Image (tube, rainbow, N blue to C red):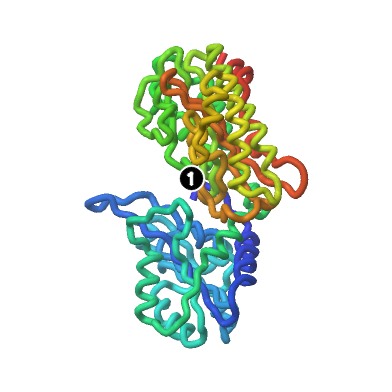
Amino acid sequence: MKYLPIDKKLFIKNRKKFVTKMKSNSLAIFNSNDIYPVSADSTLPFAQHRDIFYLSGVDQEESILVIFPDAPKEMHREMLFLKETNAHIAVWEGEKLDKKSAFETSGIQSVFWLQDFNKVLAEIMTQTENVYINTNEHYRANVETETREARFIKILKSDFPAHTYLRSQPILQRLRSVKEIEEIALIQQACDITEKGFRRILSFVKPKVMEYEIEAEYIHEFTRNRANGFAYTPIVASGYSACVLHYIENNKQCKDGEVILMDVGASYANYASDMTRCVPVSGKFTERQKNVYNAVLRVKNAAAKMLIPNTIWADYHVEVGKLMTKELIDLGLITEEDVKNENPKWPAYKKYFMHGTSHHMGLDTHDYGILTEPMQAGMVFTVEPGIYIPEENLGIRIEDDYVIQEKGEPFNLMANIPITVEEIEALMA
């Protein structure tokens, strides 16, 4: 991995939190992700399942974590099962975790090779009543491919049908949504790398540059600063393409007079950042572009101040909608009459601002968190309002990442990234 080692105390702490939420006489099992095939002998780069990483720090395929706090044998209370490494694997695939390095990574003493898993599982399943299984219950999830976790659950239930099966997700949704100070530091590192990428492109952008050339500048800067890569598929959208919310082709030429919307974030140690900035291709915003940009910026700044403990996500979005409505009226995009006659289920402002303002962020770009429960200190949210005007070939979105504080305004992890019209124009000049 490119990132620097993470202190195992974080993962020890995360497991202890999980154990406090488990029912007595229960064990929990977590699997790594598969390495996914492309065709022939080609595969996609490995990306670890965030839950096993959160609880162990293990960033390697074919790994299993078992947590069994009430196990009769102390050696079975926390266990890692890893693919056995050897000289042949080291030559062909690179060095894998051995038992010593697995302990140094995770803080788990009991490390077994994967071939011992079924034998140990058969023993501990006779000693427990309940088994926590790890299903994907994220509100945005739409999984069509059977995962390693899903295959394992199917086999487990078939082999041990008399046990009671419980869900890890309600526990993890709450635990992972509130970040430890070490996690916030890792997200900050991802944001700082993103800042370096953005500052790099400000002197690079000019008329006739291709969107994919800008994408290449970002990944160059990210990689040289130890990032895993992009935290999500980057959006580099010039002109009309900025009005396509999930535009990822990044294959058009940037023309003089257009604005480029860049929704780009680095991943560091599997922790995401999520930034959006808009820059004029020529280095100068037109008066109209500037007015729209500043309207979005005002909404972002005001919306961020609402991220305080006990705020309800749905209520927050209603209030942001009111802010955006005023700005759109001032810009001449909607009228008071439009607002008066609006459909409450699809307010007038939605014509030009059709997406949500904030989502949880952390190990996943759209991170775990239960949206119907009040916001808490330690949660990290994006704030990303936008105005999209297809008839003007103009889309503006501005996005920063914030940590909710016990008292006062949230902490902006992207406070050092240039954001005002004046800053951007000065740096591009």
Q: Is residue 111 visible?
A: no
Query: In the image, residue 386 lies at what x, y percent?
Result: 53, 30
Name above or below for residue 179 compared with residue 116: above
Q: Which amino acid, mark 1?
A: Asn
Location of residue 294 with respect to 12 vertically, above or below: above
In this view, the residue in front, 139 or 330, is: 330
Residue displayed at 54% across by 45% down:
272
The residue shown at (73%, 40%) is 409
The percent coordinates of residue 44 (x first, y second) are 34, 49
Residue in the picture at 70% in, 45% down: 308
Is the residue 218 above or below the residue 78 in the image?
Answer: above
The local secondary structure at tag 1 comes to: loop
Query: Label 1, on which residue?
Result: 228
* Residue 45 shows in the view: yes
Point out the image quarter for the C terminus: top right
Q: Position of residue 97 (x, y in %)?
A: 48, 63
> Horizontal and vertical percent for residue 263?
49, 33
State how many labels appear: 1
Mark 1 closeness class: few <14, some 14–19, many ≥20 residues within 10 Å: many
Q: Which residue is found at the position 57% from the left and 73% from the top?
A: 109
Q: Nearer the viewer, residue 95 or 111?
A: 111
Q: Residue furthest right?
A: 407
Relative placement, left or right, of 30 versus 74 is left
Residue 285 falls in image quadrant? top right
Nearer to me, 341 or 56: 341
